[in-house]
Image (cartoon, rainbow, N blue to C red):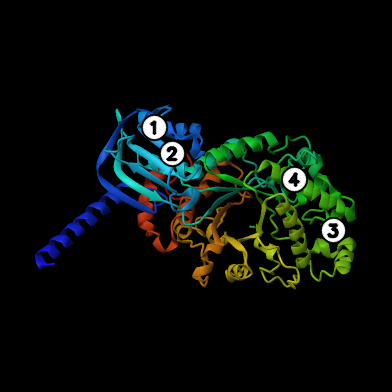
Amino acid sequence: MNCLKLLLLLFFNALVILVAAQKIDDIRILPQPFRIILNPGVVTLSHSVNVYVDPKTGADANYIWIVLQDIGFRPAFVKFEKQADIIFKRSTDTIPGGTEAYQLTIDQNVSKGRIIGIANGGSGIIYALQTLRQLSNLEENYIKFQACVIYDKPFFAWRAFMLDESRHFQGKEVVKKLIDEMARIKLNTFHWHLVDDQGWRIEIKKYPLLTKVSSKSDYSHLSKGISPKQWDSLYHHRPGFFYTQNEIREIVAYANARGVRIIPEIEIPGHASASIYAYPWLGASSKKAGQPVSGDLYLVTDPRVKKFLKDVLDEIIALFPAKIIHIGGDEANYAHWQQSEEINAFMKSENIPTYSDLQVWTNNKMSRYISSKGCRMIGWNEITGDNIRGETHIQASQKEKLAPGTIVQFWDGAVNLINKAIDRGYDVVNSNRFFTYLDYSYETTSFEKAYSFNPIPEGIAAKDQNKILGLGAQMWGELTPTEQRLYYQIFPRLAAYAEVGWVNPAKKSSYPEFLKRFMRIESIWRKKGYIVNSSQ
Ligand code: ACM
């Protein structure tokens, strides 16, 4: 190659990069797509458009209609691709990247339709739709899009938001709004913390007192030191705060249409006071005392209690098609087992040396039951049997081994517990509380700190990185009695977690670049009242 040719080539390459950089900057998508190819020109559509949705995609046409309306279109569904301006269809060749991958083409010159979203399945189609929404420029008579081809797929398969409704019940309209915002930014897992000491929030038909009694209290009562004795006298007139099974089905379907699966959490063996309040025979200390004892643990060795847990799981499994069940497992106060003759006699006869072994033994019973129903179990990282906070009263012999296939959700303790869980063969969801707890103040976990989170901790060998399934962002509800306070804690940080879950940590953009891409979503969240002041 002569010098002139080389110079010309360098010049044109530089020009292309310059133009591309400027345009990519302009189109601002969050989370950042895997690959964007900008093409010259702008595609202009009128507000009335014909839309074709291939039924084979599995995507919910009603939700597609809702989002297209939100963009400003007046969509009419047509039966044939060739009649359509906007097409969503299943790819004929599988797009690399699994069910969540998609390709979005916006092109003036394509013969059938000018916007085509293709994917291997329903989630990918929903993501193509969300990206299209972020690319739209609404004008009085037209909606304009930069011509481009976007090929996109998430880096992590598990991108979760958790809502605790035991401490404060928010109700289905709030839950639906949150699911809408998860879908907007391509979060795919709604982890629903439905049970804790402060209240039981889901109808279980076999145990009606769980809703008649256990659903009446919340954090505003229990944080005031109200004893179980006072509970009834003060609260039995209150309406219960819980979801009927029909409401659960409605919310599961709502989430499913938006590409969001729901994973319910039923806490075992601790954080179980609400259910034990209604049925004192469930609790190790409560059974002995003949009345509820707050903070109690399930008397897991009692056949009646085992039956209760299985009955509850049966109804839960039937309601949640995602087939992953969270059994909690955190912060069990072993003092309640320590003083139980039944527990100690059982441990002696079964040669279970420590209470943390008994917890692992319990987990494994649950795990076997859950897998016999075709589901997988997940729990907070205490379920490994490690003494995660190094508490002096806890002995952890690790004689009992957590069942293979269980997912460990890391939240507390030294980060190398993740490495340890992976070495033992478990998949891990990283919910390191110092980065992902939405109940923490913005002083502790700023938006920037949330964005800095890397779900893959140091020291994980490249071959093991796929054992980190992804991340969870947790909204614990003690301090969020109102909807506004709830939104204040969640937004804008949820956007940071969405990006962290979608983008390869090695390719993540700088925080200022992320903020530029966040601007559009920020203005939507302000309009919706989720972000109300600039100091957040
Ligand atoms: C937890 O925050 N107790 C899981």
Residue 158 drawn at (x, y percent): 54, 54
Q: Amino acid at mark 1?
A: Glu
C-alpha span from label 3 to label 4: 19 Å
Residue denoted by label 3: 301
Checking the image for residue 269, the label placed there is none
Checking the image for residue 314, the label placed there is 4
C-alpha span from label 1 to label 3: 61 Å
Residue denoted by label 1: 81
Q: Does residue 320 show up?
A: yes
**Residue that sits furthest to the front in the current view:** 92
Q: Which tag, 3 or 2, sits closer to the chain's start?
A: 2
Residue 418 drawn at (x, y percent): 59, 67
- The reply, left or right, for residue 155 in relation to residue 239 is left
Ligand 1's image quarter is bottom right
Q: Which tag, 4 or 2, sits closer to the chain's start?
A: 2
Q: Which tag, 1 or 2, sits closer to the chain's start?
A: 1
- Which residue: 76% across, 43% down? 214
C-alpha span from label 4 to label 2: 36 Å
Residue 217 drawn at (x, y percent): 73, 43
Q: Amino acid at mark 3?
A: Thr
C-alpha span from label 1 to label 2: 9 Å
> Would you say the residues marked 1 and 2 are in contact, meaning their CB atoms lie under 8 Å apart?
yes
Residue 470 drawn at (x, y percent): 53, 58
Q: Amino acid at mark 2?
A: Lys
Q: Classify mark 1: residues with Cα within 10 Å, few (<14), some (14-19) or many (20+).
A: some
